[in-house]
Amino acid sequence: MSTIAITGAASGIGAATTARLRNEGHTVIGVDLRDTAVIADLATAEGRQSAVAGVLDACGGVLDGLVTCAGLSGYPGRPGSLLASLNYFGTIEVMEGLRPALARSTNGPSAGAISSNSTTTAPNYSMELVEALLAGDEAAACAVADTIDSLVVYAPTKLAVARWVRHSAISPEWAGAGIRLNAVAPGMIATPMIDEGNSDEFIAKQLEMFKQTIALGRAGRPEEIAALIGLLLSADGGFFCGSVLFCDGGTDALLRADDWPARWNL
């Protein structure tokens, strides 16, 4: 059995993944603001350092799996910088901080980040913010994010996560060290994030419109994403490396059927 750390483990996809893995006999070290073994605020540098230290202490310095589920969507009055700090830096700094522990595993280590299908289905979002996040200067990226309504900050933070995964996964530090790194891009999933959105009249209307793009006609269940994450962490997912897997009930295919796969033009 494996030892796996999960951020955002107290609710939504993180909670469903925690329950699934524990039911399979794995040891799960949860990280969240409450109700987990490691309490930390990943929106702050200090919180990320505390989370990494707490996980390392709990796992004895050797980790078999890592899943970064912690994140927030935009909401009226919520600063865009909070999303930039939590969704991007709260993912990447935890990944980088725990990578050495994954490298010490002899059990086929694997890491997975939560991206989003908003990366391909939200229109005209800020690529300036994506580039600022990938540049790695949190203060500068947050300054850009705070010039943008937080309702349209979520997608660029998740694109930045996906691009970081694609570039990092094939590097000597990850694949070269025997660690598989991938991302999952869920669509609309019935989680507290959606419940919060439905509490605002404007966002609720947008969500209802977005629901019409789901070919299967319903929101996904957190347990369905947890099943995909479980595959990526397992030996059965042993050939996944640098993949971004969409699990969205058909939304991406409905809106962008011909955009991907795309021919490589030399």
Image: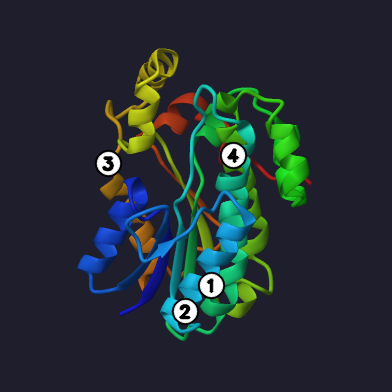
Mark positioned earlier in the residue sequence (2 or 4):
2
- How many angstroms separate mark 2 from mark 3 (CA)? 32 Å
Q: Which mark is residue 221?
A: 3
Mark 2 Cα within 10 Å, few/some/many (few <14, many 20+)?
few
Q: Earlier in the sequence, mark 2 or mark 3?
A: 2
| Mark found first going from the N terminus, 1 or 3 | 1
Q: CA distance from mark 3 to mark 4?
A: 26 Å
Image quarter for residue 29?
Answer: bottom left
Give the answer, above or below, for where 161 lies relative to 40.
above
Q: Which residue is mark 4?
A: 82
Kind of residue at badge 2:
Asp
Q: Which tag is nearer the camera, tag 3 or tag 4?
A: 4
Q: Amino acid at mark 1?
A: Ala
**How far apart are the two marked residues, 2 and 4, measured between alpha carbons?**
27 Å
How many callouts does the rendering have? 4
Please name the residue shown 39% across and 37% down the image.
248
Image side of residue 200 versus residue 112, left or right: left
Disc number lying in front (2 or 3)? 2
Task: Give the residue number, with chain letter if any, for mark 1.
Answer: 53
Q: Which residue is mark 2?
A: 57
- Residue type at tag 4: Leu
Secondary structure under tag 4 reads helix
Where disc 1 sits, the SS reads: helix
Residue at the image point whose x is 58% and y is 27% from the top: 150
Left or right of 43, for residue 209 = left
Q: Which mark is residue 76?
A: none
Residue 54, given in percent of the width and then of the height, sits at 48, 71
The kind of secondary structure element at disc 3 is loop
